[in-house]
Image: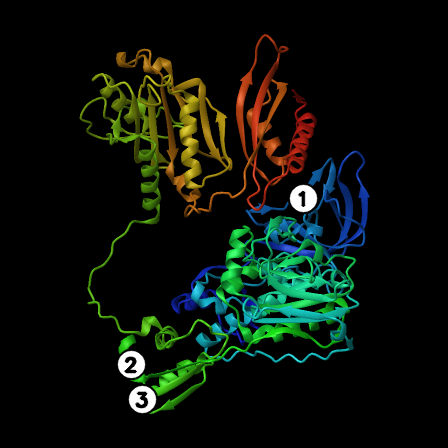
Amino acid sequence: MLVSYNWLKDFLNMDGVDPYALAEKLSRSGVEIASTVHPEDGVSKLVVGHILTCEKIEGTHLNKTTVDVGEDEARQIVCGAPNVAAGQDVIVALPGARLPGGIKIKKGKLRGIESNGMICGLQELGFSDSVVPPKYADGIWVFHDPDLKPGDSVFAALGMDDYVLDFDITPNRADTSSMEGAAYEVGALIDQKPKIEDVVLKEDGADWTGDFTAVADEKIAPKYYLRKLTGVKIAESPLWMQARLWNAGIRPINNVVDATNYVMLLTGQPMHAYDAKLFDNTKKIEVRLAKEGEKLQLLNEKEINLDPQDIVITDGEQAVGLAGVMGGLNSEVTEETTDVILEAAVFDPALTRKAALRHDNRTDASALFEKGINWDNTQKALDICALILRANAGATVLSGEIKASDLDKEAVVITTTASRTNKILGTDLSMDEIVKILGKLNFPVAVNGDEYTVTVPNRRWDIFIDSDIFEEVGRIYGYDNIKSTHPATGELIGGYAADEVKARHLRQLLEGQGLSETINYSLTSEELATTFVKKALAPVKVNWPLNSARTTMRQNLICGLLDTVAYNFARKQTELQLFENGRVYDMEGGDYHEHEHLAAAYVGLAGESNWQHKDEVVDFYYVKGQLEDVFEMIGVKDVEYRAEAIKGMHPTRTAGIYVNDEYIGLIGQIAPVLAMTDKNFAGKEIYVYELNLDALLPLMAKGVKSKPAPKYPAVQRDLSILVDEDVTNAQVESCIKENAGKYLVSVEVIDVYQGAHLAAGKKSLAYRLTFLNEAETLTDAVVTKATDNVQAALEEKLEANIR
């Protein structure tokens, strides 16, 4: 359950209550908070803009707009959204704005036309595809709120100024699966009684119950209520309601569907709205078990074969909904709907759960029904939804309601003693303290000496026995306040500095790749000390060297690794993968400096020789792949490899490593001339890389975030192009990534050819593009559109021929 901090303010005085501190307090009281998210974090300079003009840019899908953002002059912005038009109020990211993912908006040109900002869709603000209203899924967001003016910040309007607490609810605490339930829980912790208002609904239409009947079996639907509304005008819901819905993880659809979802979030009572014209012929609703052979097409267009243990809603003849799970497509509220019938009910939790699992169609409603709901809220939810539709959809609430079933739920009364409470909890609470704690939970208590009796409200259907009461007392009193019996010790726990933790993590990653760690002397010859570095600095010499080979402090680690390689070669160990983590030394500006480095050396085969496969010899690309795996595992991105001429390295098989234009190391082959100085190196290719950890460690991610494996399949498309031989792979990949859209997850080179069958100065490149939507299955249309955009961009920007 995603709980809105701002919505809690409707029930409680939250002044001075920090959302993060509240989350910690809730977790300590037994309701775990999986995360606390502030959607506005990392996002800035987003304002409301009013589009004054919108002109199509000939030959493109782009539009040139002028937008009033509350400044003295309107801004010119180029926008490619298909739904952009003059007269709209939109979200504008001004130059300098920050968007999720670290994206910074800058002034620029598109197709040679100046663009001073960006008109945004909700996804670009970090909203999930699953909550963006369908109307705006493929374009920009358009405001319809007359109170918003150009230049106003959008964060409050879109609910991004909120804090969303993710209640990781266990089955026994399903009472917190609503805003009212969450308010009771939070109120108990901050010692406030939530303001839960009674609902008074005034009916303003003719009675409709005379010619309509409803029948429900009390065993499968102990409560089943209906109301009818006419004159409904289908439209978008008010922005405040949409913001509350998407912050709760629900996609806004229209004002009728949104009202039912809003009431479900508010009260925990699932609801459904039927298009009333479905029942014009039969004038009847019947709730029963399905018959053998019956079928139903659900709202998600999935057709199911109903089981005799499925509870179904029917029009007296055919099924129109799978009770507690999802309505039927034939009862859907559409833009043509004018009259609706609202349903609020309680269905058998076991049958609802089994039906959802049986048809692989678990919904928010079924999740609530299977865990149990508050029977006291059925009437309230029905009336609130009617009030909302009167206000937001211009509906007329017809007089009367139909109750096909209406069983009462007997209150649970528990009697126990203060002495037993303290014995079980290990506390020493007085009766007054126990009563005060239960009062925070809004539990009525009657006291008789050491004995007290609790009348449990129906909203807490998880409480049955005295042990449940003890648990409530203990968690509100505070588990931390219960004295511990563990002996106190004076031991101190040691630890590593942050950079040392990162360096150790790097070493573990290299060990995981199969490399062996070495430790070498910090002293070497003056020649080798200043070799294998892009820019040699003044050497640091020792006054009394032991011999001519150990006169100078090293400026690189590669020289030591070569000594280790030579030592192993002399002993017939020629398949080596080694690394070292250590300090290097130099003098600059008259001062001595130490730097932390990491280096690795590879020679021989990439793996053990085996009759089952062809041996792979280590080369530049193998070593580069190993290093790229390390960068990926530590979260370092935007790594660039540039051809470099570095002393001691191969002239055409060496690259400098850069991150954001900062040099952090090198990778390549040891120069053959240098390798020939040692007879043991004869005929061997030695590949190395060396990294400056002083520059690299600050770039490492703080931790690796894991996520579940995708539930939906990826789609792969191969692309072969013919380009000029001076076009680099980096240029091609950059062009592909810029134009393939948000579902592209990887680009892989699968073939390179340059030879007799191609024109001089040309080369053929083949790529495999992988697309994945983690929210739903990708369609061929979406992938084809993405590949078409890529091909067009390659032809335009790189003059590529698609093969």
Query: Foreground residue, 235 or 90?
Result: 235
- Asked if the residues shown at circle 3 and circle 2 are in contact, with their CB atoms under 8 angstroms apart, the answer is no
Local secondary structure at mark 3? loop
Is residue 665 left or right of 231 when viewed as pictured?
left
Amino acid type at mark 2: Arg
Question: Is residue 511 in view from this perspective?
Answer: yes
Read off the residue under disc 1: 107
Q: Which mark is residue 22?
A: none
Task: Measuring from the top left, give residue 389's x and y in whole percent.
Answer: 72, 69
Query: Gap in Å between the C-alphas at discs 2 and 1?
Result: 71 Å
- The image's colour scheme reads rainbow
Query: Foreground residue, 175 or 699?
Result: 175
Query: Which of the two labelled residues, at mark 2 and mark 1, occupies the earlier sequence position?
Result: 1
Query: Gap in Å between the C-alphas at discs 1 and 3?
Result: 74 Å
Figure check: 320 above or below 403: above
Residue that sits furthest to the bottom in the current view:
449
Amino acid type at mark 1: Lys
For label 2, the crowd category at 10 Å Cα-Cα, with few meaning under 14, some 14 to 19 and many 20 or more, is some
Local secondary structure at mark 2? helix
Tell me the residue at 58%/74% (across/down).
Answer: 377
Amino acid type at mark 3: Asp
Read off the residue under disc 2: 420
Local secondary structure at mark 1? loop
